[in-house]
Amino acid sequence: MLEQIKFTTQSILSKTNNFKPQFGIILGTGLGGLVNEIKAEFSIPYSQIPNFPVSTVEGHSGTLIFGELGGKKVMAMQGRFHFYEGYTMQQVTFPVRVMKELGIHTLIVSNASGGMNPAFEVGELMLINDHINLFSTNPLIGKNITELGPRFPDMSEAYKKEYIELALKIAKENNIKVSQGVYAGLSGPCFETPAEYRYIWRIGADVVGMSTVPEVIVAKHSGMNCFGISIVTDLGVEGSVQNVSHEEVQHIAKAQEPKMSLIVKELIRQIN
Ligand code: HPA
């Protein structure tokens, strides 16, 4: 894996005139609009990046964008890889390994989720302050590669508190309502049954989705800081679980895009 990471990183550097991003951004479901805020210098389709899988799901296009956002150098993934697409956990998280090798210190992740906390509304923006790994596996299973990180990585502050505080301040200054909570990540691709939503809520999660956890685990393993923000696109609140579709998820996420973009952009501007 080490050789693949180095090979892919070299290939990217050769296509980007040695562009060295500081921030990595993974743009989730329907949140690709943040890309319009990036002053792009280089764009590379995943198909031209060695060892990168190609994104298959509707609404995820599959391009790496290098440029400037909030006065900082960023690399954004337009389109991410999901475990439910059939990729291995190593494939899902490979881009995060490459980010680290490129010198990125902070990973910013966005996603869409179903909300179980009864205080939440459709369209709610939630800063992820912790997660629960309900994937049946973990991207770090297997022989540990010491050069990449420790065998037993600490997860006591998976989502950096300082960034959450900063994001709360930015939201307040811009009259944007945000909450905080715990994201449970599981494989999908089914949305949850009412009993599953009830179970996930009772074990301590506020929202549930099908991404983010693998990438954050690998980012922490490699010593990066993480910030995650979720758009609640549907509710799995006990007693009133409603029908949910991928189209509805995308539609709701799209409507909230400008607010999320503003928070992420300002956050990047204010992080040193
Ligand atoms: N469950 C899982 N993933 C999701 C949901 C959900 O309700 N909404 C958006 N992504």
Image (cartoon, rainbow, N blue to C red):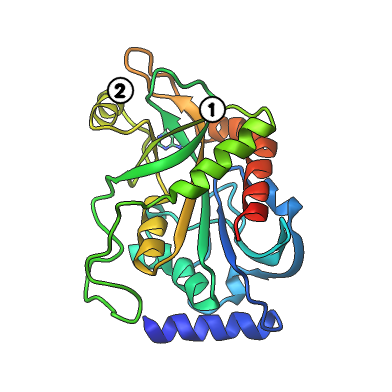
User: Which residue is depicted at the point 34% across and 82% down?
Assistant: 147
Toward the viewer: 44 or 155?
Answer: 155
Toward the top, the furthest residue is 239
Q: Label 1: how many residues lie within 10 Å, few (<14), some (14-19) or many (20+)?
A: many
When the figure is inspected, residue 213 is found, relative to residue 250, above or below; the finding is below
Which residue corresponds to mark 1?
A: 124
Q: Indicate the quadrant containing the C terminus: top left, top right, bottom left or bottom right.
A: bottom right
Q: Residue 194 carries which label?
A: 2
User: Which residue is depicted at the point 48% across and 77% down?
Assistant: 51
Toward the viewer: 152 or 215?
Answer: 152
Q: In which quarter of the image is ligand 1?
A: top left
Position of residue 52 measured from the top left corner of the image (x, y, whole percent): 50, 72
Q: Which amino acid does label 2 sit on?
A: Pro
Q: Quadrant of residue 85?
A: bottom left
Callout 2 secondary element: helix
User: How many numbered callouts?
Assistant: 2
Q: Label 2: how many residues lie within 10 Å, few (<14), some (14-19) or many (20+)?
A: some
Q: Which mark is residue 103?
A: none
Position of residue 114 measured from the top left corner of the image (x, y, whole percent): 43, 31
When the figure is inspected, residue 129 is found, relative to residue 177, above or below; the finding is below
- Please state if 154 lies on the left or on the right of 86 as rendered: left
Q: Distance between the residues labelled 1 and 2?
A: 20 Å
- Please state if 82 lies on the left or on the right of 259 as rendered: left
**Does the Cβ of the disc 2 residue fall within 8 Å of ligand 1?**
no
Q: Indicate the quadrant containing the N terminus: top left, top right, bottom left or bottom right.
A: bottom left
